[in-house]
Image: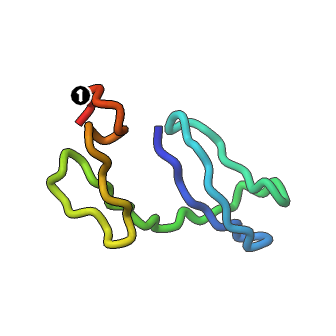
Amino acid sequence: MPVYEYQCATCEHQFEELVLSGSTVVACPECTSTDLQKLLSKFQRTRVGGDMPAPASAPAPRAGGCCGGGCGCH
């Protein structure tokens, strides 16, 4: 389910909204206006399966797997 970012054309409030379907009517939570502009979202890069290096600020993985419990979730 996609989360979209909007800015209200009436009061300029910016907010995020979970949109369940294309027919969902989104309204500003501040003024209830439906005159909205969909903003371009920043994509977040995530580490999946070790194919992308972790950021320098990320803690090093613990021995025994990603959760440290040796459960084999790595």
**Relative to 6, does residue 62 appear above or below in the rendering?**
above
**Relative to 68, does residue 61 appear above or below in the rendering?**
below
**Relative to 4, does residue 54 appear above or below in the rendering?**
below
Q: Amino acid at mark 1?
A: Gly
| Residue at 21 percent of width and 63 percent of height | 53
The answer to which of 46 and 55 lies nearer the viewer is 55
The answer to which of 29 and 27 lies nearer the viewer is 29
Query: Residue 63 location in percent, x, y?
Result: 27, 44
Query: Residue 69 location in percent, x, y?
Result: 35, 31
| Residue at 46 percent of width and 67 percent of height | 40
Q: Which residue is mark 1?
A: 72
| In this picture, residue 31 sits left or right of residue 23 | right
| In this picture, residue 3 sits left or right of residue 74 | right
Where is residue 23, by image quadrant?
Answer: top right
Q: Secondary structure at mark 1?
A: loop
Q: Quadrant of the C terminus?
A: top left
| Residue at 54 percent of width and 34 percent of height | 20
Q: How is the image coloured?
A: rainbow
Task: Report crowding for label 1: few under 14, some 14 to 19, many 20 or more residues within 10 A (C-alpha).
Answer: few
